[in-house]
């Protein structure tokens, strides 16, 4: 049976603001993405996931939307998007959009009507509650810090915002809200997009009684385990509706962002009976200690927990988390890329990780993130060694600073270097594309010396073994096979420090 494209392929998470600027305002745009599609095609990825480019005051960089069916002038026009989509499809690249259903901007016409008066027909499109004892309705916290409630002085009620106060939560228990967001999906599906990554799906429904969250000994609660503010049972029914809309357009994919550290039964529950998310994003590799035993245990448990009808997925980089090369250290980048691109399931590659990009220090005077801390992982893509790293014209001011190491860590330099991280990533993607064991084979853990992670990818046509030395010392391994690719130049002898190898096992 032929696998769906999103099972065979690799998804490239592309932060539009930071990819390529063509109009000289220092902010990446849709024409910039189009201009760089040849790089992505050369690299060997299969789909691009675009961060939000909809109309927005940009208080949270596009996750605060005022019009879900138009392009913000900062990024271009609808015609620019249509051209990007056509050019991507011409190259065989799929395009996935970020769908943001939990909240809107405070400036959205829907919310303007909702807060106009308690009698407005759209009042119930958002979540409003009376004060309790002169304060917020309950103890719920915003992800960004502080209370999740803000008082609207004019109407005397609090509105709920699980994120910034400028991002009021929609009331997904209201049928008109659901229908409105369904129409947003159809708008983009009719234009030809290949699917959605749905933002924060576990926040869509809240407890109807608005009960306080139980607190731990520190007076807090863990969002992933919250009982009332998120993770409500009815959320799964909402996802079935989104899946039904998606499935009406053959060949499309529905991906969902869930809380980072969800226990496996909760995470895999979002697959449903092949009627919810195709891929509930598995973020666990971002947080598990980079040690062979811990990684092997989780990878095996997760692979076995994924329902038979479902498909795994893996993430090692994100626009919300410190970059992979910074978290793990530069010595581990190649082994990490090998892990990401050889496990069973769909990998998501964050832009710049193919270069080994690290977090870029951002002085306080240049900080842009309202949450604090995410700017260093969102800095401009370095294309050349020239001014502004080729991200924007020399006379422009990039919206975030360009890394000081862009003189050697850039696409042009690394594409010409057969030993670079970029060419290694391309080789990995080529290996994944040409070896059916990596795209379709089973996963099986293999016992290995301490500090070494080893697993087989087995397919009726071939049997591959991946071994990763996650230590800083050479390790002799009792494995034999024909080397196909190594993180190092030499492929014989003991595994070098931080070396990974892909080997073909003769049957």
Image (cartoon, rainbow, N blue to C red):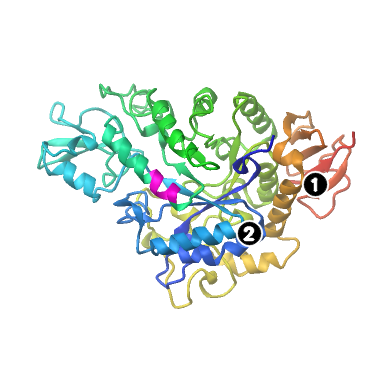
Percent across and percent down for residue 351 are: 56, 55
Rate crowding at label 2 as few (under 14), some (14 to 19) or many (20 or more) other CA atoms within 10 Å: some
In this rendering, is residue 250 above or below 24? Answer: above
Task: Name the secondary structure under disc 1.
Answer: loop
* Residue 25 sits inside the magenta stretch: no
The quadrant the N terminus occupies is top right
Q: Earlier in the sequence, mark 2 or mark 1?
A: 2
Residue 198 or 135: which is nearer the viewer? 198
Percent across and percent down for residue 459 are: 78, 34
The quadrant the C terminus occupies is top right
Looking at the image, residue 119 sits to the left or right of residue 213; the answer is left
The number of numbered badges drawn on the structure is 2
Give the residue drawn at x 16%, y 27%.
132
The residue under label 1 is 496
Give the residue drawn at x 41%, y 32%.
241
Asked if the residue under mark 1 is in contact with the one under mark 2, i.e. CB atoms within 8 Å, the reply is no
The residue under label 2 is 41
Range of magenta residues = 185-190
In this rendering, is residue 488 above or below 212? Answer: below
Quadrant of the image occupied by residue 26? bottom left
Looking at the image, residue 101 sits to the left or right of residue 442; the answer is left
| Residue 468 seen in render | no
Give the residue drawn at x 49%, y 25%.
266
- How far is disc 2 from disc 1 in space, using C-alphas? 32 Å
Task: Name the secondary structure under disc 2.
Answer: helix
Please tell me whether mark 2 or mark 1 is closer to you in this view.
Answer: 2
Looking at the image, residue 267 sits to the left or right of residue 465; the answer is left
């Amino acid at each position: 049976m032929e696998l769906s494209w999103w099972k065979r392929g690799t998804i490239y998470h592309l932060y539009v603001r930071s990819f390529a600027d063509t109009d000289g305002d220092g902010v990446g745009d849709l024409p910039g993405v189009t201009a760089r599609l040849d790089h992505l095609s050369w690299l060997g990825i299969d789909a691009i996931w675009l961060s939000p480019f909809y109309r927005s005051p940009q208080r949270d960089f596009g996750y605060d939307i005022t019009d879900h069916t138009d392009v913000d002038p900062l990024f271009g026009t609808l015609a620019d998007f249509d051209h990007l989509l056509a050019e991507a499809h011409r190259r065989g690249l799929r395009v996935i959009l970020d769908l943001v259903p939990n909240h809107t901007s405070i400036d959205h016409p829907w919310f303007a009507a909702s807060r106009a008066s308690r009698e407005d027909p759209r009042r119930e499109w958002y979540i409003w509650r009376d004060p309790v004892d002169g304060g917020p309705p309950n103890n719920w916290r915003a992800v960004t810090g502080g209370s999740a409630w803000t008082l609207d002085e004019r109407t005397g009620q609090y509105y709920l915002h699980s994120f910034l106060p400028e991002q009021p939560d929609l009331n997904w228990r209201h049928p008109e809200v659901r229908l409105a967001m369904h129409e947003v999906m159809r708008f983009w599906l009719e234009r030809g997009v290949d699917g959605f990554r749905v933002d924060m799906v576990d926040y869509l429904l809240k407890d109807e009684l608005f009960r306080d969250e139980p607190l731990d000994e520190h007076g807090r609660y863990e969002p992933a385990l919250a009982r009332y503010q998120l993770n409500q049972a009815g959320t799964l029914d909402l996802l079935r509706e989104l899946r039904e809309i998606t499935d009406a357009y053959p060949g499309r994919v529905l991906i969902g962002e869930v809380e980072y550290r969800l226990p496996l039964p909760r995470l895999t529950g979002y697959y449903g009976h092949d009627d919810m998310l195709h891929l509930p994003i598995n973020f666990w590799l971002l947080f598990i200690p980079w040690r062979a035993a811990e990684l092997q245990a989780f990878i095996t448990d997760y692979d076995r927990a994924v329902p038979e009808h479902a498909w795994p997925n893996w993430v090692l980089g994100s626009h919300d988390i410190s970059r992979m090369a910074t978290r793990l250290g530069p010595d581990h980048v190649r082994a990490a890329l090998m892990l990401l691109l050889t496990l069973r399931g769909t990998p998501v590659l964050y832009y710049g990780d193919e270069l080994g990009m690290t977090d870029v220090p951002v002085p306080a005077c240049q900080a842009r993130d309202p949450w604090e801390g995410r700017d260093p992982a969102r800095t401009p893509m370095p294309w050349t060694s020239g001014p502004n790293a080729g991200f924007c014209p020399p006379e422009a001011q990039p919206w975030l600073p360009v890394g000081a190491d862009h003189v050697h860590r850039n696409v042009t330099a690394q594409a010409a270097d057969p030993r670079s991280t970029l060419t290694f990533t391309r080789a990995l993607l080529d290996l994944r594309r040409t070896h059916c064991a990596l795209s379709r084979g089973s996963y099986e853990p293999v016992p290995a010396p301490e500090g070494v992670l080893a697993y087989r990818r087995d397919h009726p046509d071939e049997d591959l073994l991946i071994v990763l030395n996650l230590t800083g010392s050479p390790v002799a391994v009792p494995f034999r096979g024909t080397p196909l690719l190594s993180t190092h130049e030499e492929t014989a002898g003991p595994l070098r420090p931080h070396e990974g190898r892909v080997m073909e096992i003769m049957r």
